[in-house]
Image (cartoon, rainbow, N blue to C red):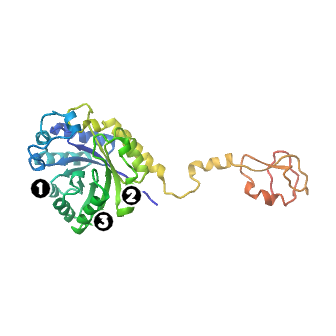
Amino acid sequence: MKRIKTLIIAEAGVNHNGDIKIAKKLIDAAVYAGADIIKFQTFSSVGLTTSSAIKSNYQKSETKPNETQQEMLSKLELTKENHLELINYCQKKGIEFLSSAFDNESISFLDSLNLKRWKIPSGEITNYPYLKFVGSKNKEIILSTGMSNMHEIEAALEIILESGCDKKNITFLQCNSQYPTPFEDANLRVIQTLKNKFKVNAGFSDHTIGIEAPIAAVAMGATIIEKHLTLNKNMEGPDHKASIEPDEFRDLVISIRNIEKAIGDGIKTVNPSESENKILVRKSLYAKKSIKKGERFTVENICLKRPGSGISPLLWNEVLKLNAKKNFEIDEQIVI
C-alpha cells in the first residue's frame, strides 16, 4: 500500500505576539524547517470571549496574570490587512498559508481569501452553527479533537457531513489541549481509533514537549502533523513554552520524512540494499571432508558454510539421498 505523504503544519498561532514582522519571521522559519503549511489564527477578541473570561493556568503563567482572556487576545489579533500581507509573503516564500477561524465572520473572511482548506480548532468541536457553516463550504477540513469524547466527535462529523462536506475531505487530529501536554495524556493510539471508527484520515496536533510524540504518531499512521513553532521559547506569550524553535522543527521534519521511508509498503521482499549480503551471510552445502565420486552424501561428509552461493540448506534432506557425481575436496561447494 502506497503511503500518503504526511502533511506537516507549523502552527504559528499567536506566537507572532501581534507583530507582523515576527509573523513573517515565523513564515521564514517554517520554510527553513521544511513545513508544508504555516497556520495562524483568525478571530476577534471581543467576539470570542466575554469581557470577564479568565485565562487558563498555563496562560496566566506565561502572560500578565491579572489581565482577562479578552485583554490578552486583543494584543494577538491579526487585522484583515495583516492576513493579506502574510498570504502574499507565503506565496513569495512558497509555503501554504492557513488559519484557524474561531467564528462564522472569520470563516467568511478566510473564504474570501480562497484558502485551500479549513482548520477547526478543538474549542469549536461542539459549535453547531460554526460546524454547519464550515461544512457547507465543502473544502478539505482538518478538525482537532482536544477536550472531546467519541460522542462529541461523532456528532461533529454528522453535522459536517449533513452540511454537504464530502467525507473523504475530512481529517481528525488526535489532540490534548493542555499546554504542554503530559506524555501520558498524548494517547497516540486514538489515531487508529479515529480511523477505524469514523473511516476518515487521522493525524496528530501535538502539544507535548520535544519532537518524539509526533514522530511516533507518523509511525502509527498519522497523515497530518501539527506542531507549534516559535522563534524563541522564552518569548512572552501564552504558547511559546509548548512550541519548538526552528532548528528543532527542522529536525522534526527530517525525522518524519525518514520515518515515511522506513514504514514502506508492507510487502516483505528482498530489498536492493540487502541483496549483496544475501549470498555473503547465508550458507550453502560444502564438503566437510574429501568425498569420492559415487560416495553417498552423509551428515559426516557435508556441512553448511558461507557463502550461500550454492545449494540451499533447505535441500539438506534431498541431498542426503544422493551420491556424489564427482570428487570433492574439503570446503569445496557441493554440486549435484
- Residue shown at the point (37%, 40%) measured from the top left: 211
Asked if marks 1 and 3 touch (Cβ < 8 Å), the reply is no
Amino acid type assigned to the residue bearing label 1 in the image: Glu
CA gap between label 1 and label 3 equals: 24 Å
Amino acid type assigned to the residue bearing label 3 in the image: Lys
Q: What label sits on residue 332 in the rendered view?
A: none
Which image quadrant: the C terminus? bottom right
Q: Categorize mark 3 by other alpha carbons within 10 Å: few (<14), some (14-19), many (20+).
A: some
Q: Position of residue 169 (x, y in %)?
A: 29, 62
For marks 1 and 2 on the same chain, the one whose residue lies earlier in the sequence: 1
Q: Position of residue 327 (x, y in %)?
A: 88, 52
- Residue that mark 1 sits on: 105
- Residue that mark 3 sits on: 167
- Residue that mark 2 sits on: 193
**Secondary structure of the residue carrying numbered label 3:** helix
CA gap between label 2 and label 3 equals: 17 Å
**Secondary structure of the residue carrying numbered label 1:** helix
Amino acid type assigned to the residue bearing label 2 in the image: Thr
